[in-house]
Amino acid sequence: MTTKIIPPSFITHSEELLDKGYDPKVARGILQFVKPYAARMFFALTLMIIVTASAVSWPYFVKLAIDEGITKNDPIALRNICLTFLAVSIIQLVTNFFRVRIMSRVGQHVLYDVRTAMFDHLQKLSLSFYNRYSVGRVITRVINDVGTLREFITWAVLAIVRNLLGIIGTLIAMLALNVRLSLLTFTVLPLMIWATIAFRKAARQNYRKVRAAVSWTNSVLAENVNGVRVVQAFSRQEHNHHNFKDYVNRYFLETSLDAAKVASIFTPIVDVLGATATALVVYIGGRAVLGEEITAGVLIAFVLYIDRLFDPIRDLSRRFDTLQSTMAGGERILELLHTPVEVQDAEDAREMGAIIGDVRFEAVSFYYKDDQPIRPSSTDFAKNASSSAQGEDLVLDGIDLDVRAGETVALVGETGAGKTTIVKLLTRFHDPTSGCVRVDGVDLRTVTQGSLRKQMGMVLQDPFLFNGTVKENILFGRLDARDEEVIAAAKAVGAHDFIIALRNGYETSVEEGGALLSVGQRQLISFARALLADPRILILDEATSSVDTQTEQIIQKALATLLKGRTSFVIAHRLSTITNADKIVVIHDGKIVEQGTHVELLANQGMYYELYRTGFQD
């Protein structure tokens, strides 16, 4: 559990230092998801041009109404001008409605495509990726960053186009009306450009900090929610709240306020510059009206056009935040999508046939590479950031092991000896650095992972149940099983009695992670799930270490059924789990130092004998 929350300033450079604006590489990556909807976006752009032209024209209609209708006292001309203006406004309304509708649908489709692609890729990524990235950071990418992308595509893209078209159209209209007043208005534009550049630079820095704070906040929240039992058990609520408030919430609040402060300065500057330009035009143009050099309609139209000119400039500055957000979020999305899957099927990989169960490890060695560090938590982030892995962390060294079909092999040894790594290589969660793992004589790297794992079952020390019913969790490895088979599997492992005692029996919801069940009950359901899947190779990774003695006795009875006729690898710290194994393999410092039956190894009085004396006796 967390003892100290590291502020976002400690987040890695490669992930959070996105201090840049438009990035063509990111833009090209995002366009890959937009291309299928290019025709719709082009149609929306056409509608946007009509909307912008209509918006630019209405000050000119005001000028016509004043000069041609009111000044000349011509009610018919005034009526015709007003009707034309009304028709243009209706056209603007209709086209804008369809433009918003089209872009909203495009944005939602792109959102769906990106999230689907990310979820699919996350399912394929190797375990080493999840050792490096916390859940909160992954969720930030899939939820926050993709949401930002949708916001940009739905609103910002065409808004930027609309603003640019609006500025160009307004400039043309102003120059067409009066060149002198137009040049007078343009005198404030250099100051406007300078203010915009200054605002962009300040906003860019603040936005980077805000995004870092968001990512880190999600990570800390996920950690504290997942560890809420430990927090409450040690009465750490007040301490964790203090850390969260001081390090995360305060940092996020301060960076957000800094961003708001920059915006609060920029907006008044634009308003003052707009007011200055308006005052100059009214003064100079008013004198021109008095001197009958221009009409009153031209002057009023100019005042309206000034507001039309500065509004899109002001909006473009705000849209820069969205662009910055999209570039940062897009880079993180593409970084995730381009993360290589370290364990991949070979191009010529074939489907694994029905497994008999012979397993052989041939001179297998394995080490974690430098780019596979242990995932930092908020408690040890600073330590891990300052001391990366040195060289190669050798886990297994020259493992040779033969297991015949149907044998039960117990892997024993001290913590960190490499027991779990052996079964991870068997299931191809990792590939050996050197050597070869074979099943029925077939190199596992030559077959597809899916066809291999469908014939394997695994029960972990801390069984994970998905949010759903008991029945759905038992069916997880074999969706086509009948209800009778589900009940039979539960009875075989001793889970049926407690299941039918639940409120809704097999239809009882277990909630996320099986929160409504005890550890022993979750473990029994995981045994039923493994039995129903009927794997040819079964792996039990300390599956009884977290249950009470009474539940363990039930599980021991179930194991006889579960292990029968299957090649099984059992990692355990309890003597009762391994004494009946056909072969016990003792691992020390990544090497096999002993193997044999329980009786044989005790007679040798080697390392297993010492482990038995000190750690395995019940």
Image: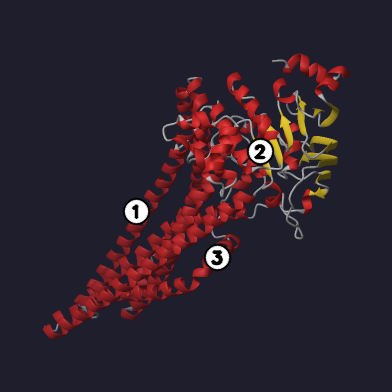
Q: Nearer the viewer, residue 28 or 479?
A: 479
Q: Which mark is residue 458?
A: 2
Sequence-wise, the earlier of marks 3 and 1 is 3
Image-quadrant location for residue 107: bottom left
Q: Is residue 154 above or below residue 516?
A: below
Left or right position of 556 against 437: left
Q: How many marks?
A: 3
CA distance for labels 2 and 1: 64 Å
Q: Amino acid at mark 1?
A: Pro
Circle 3 sits in a helix, a strand or a loop, which is it?
helix
The quadrant in which residue 464 appears is top right
Q: Which comes before the other along the chain, label 3 or label 2?
A: 3
Image coordinates of residue 259 in percent, x first then y, are 43, 46
Mark 2 vs 1: CB contact within 8 A: no
Q: Secondary structure at mark 2?
A: strand
In the depicted structure, whether residue 543 falls above or below residue 536: above
Q: Is residue 12 above or below residue 156?
A: above
> What whole-number distance in Å separates the C-alpha atoms at marks 3 and 1?
36 Å
Task: Please identify the quadrant where the N terminus is shown.
Answer: top right
How would you rate the neighbour count of disc 1 (Cα within 10 Å): few for under 14, some for 14-19, many for 20 or more?
A: few
| Residue 487 drawn at (x, y percent) | 54, 38
- Residue under the image location 84 percent in, 30 percent down: 592
Q: Which residue is mark 3?
A: 31
Q: How is the image coloured?
A: secondary structure
Q: Residue at x 61, y 54 (%)?
A: 337
Q: On the image, numbered disc 1 is attached to which residue? A: 268
The answer to whether the residue labelled 3 contacts the one labelled 2, judged by CB atoms less than 8 Å apart, is no
